[in-house]
Image: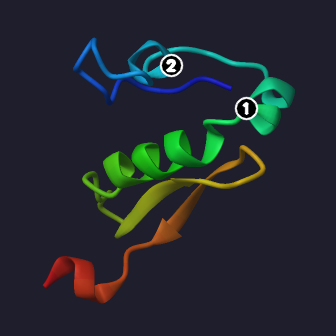
Amino acid sequence: MAFGHFISDQSDPLWRYSDSAMHRTCFLAWPKKEEFRARQNADYRRVIYPDQTIFRLEENGDLITVPVARSWLD
């Protein structure tokens, strides 16, 4: 799995995983997985594609596209 850069603060404990790669099995067993996933998904919400979708990192490590909720655009 590869993650884009989304944490700029080098003192952040998750910084070293931003813009990095990880085996899926390692990600799934990682104690910080949910915290990382929540922060990654918060970053993904900032980029809305022309087809009104965003990326979302699922619990199983899949990266999917989902439609943007109408309330996010208002």
Q: Residues within 10 Å of mark 2 (few under 14, many from 20)?
A: some
Q: Is residue 34 above or below residue 26?
A: below
Q: Is residue 42 above or below residue 18?
A: below
Closest to the observer: 69 or 9?
9
Kindly identify which residue carries mark 2.
Answer: 17
Instruction: Give the residue type that dot 1 points to.
Output: Trp
Residue placed at 44% from the left, 17% from the top?
A: 19
Mark 1 falls on what kind of element?
loop
Closest to the observer: 31 or 1?
31
Q: Is residue 8 left or right of residue 52?
A: left
Which numbered disc covers residue 2? none
Residue furthest right in the image: 25
In the rendered image, the quadrant that contains the N terminus is top right
In the rendered image, the quadrant that contains the C terminus is bottom left
Residue 28 at x, y percent in the picture: 79, 38
Q: Examine the image and state in which quarter residue 29 appears.
A: top right
Kindly identify which residue carries mark 1.
Answer: 30
Instruction: Give the residue type that dot 2 points to.
Output: Tyr
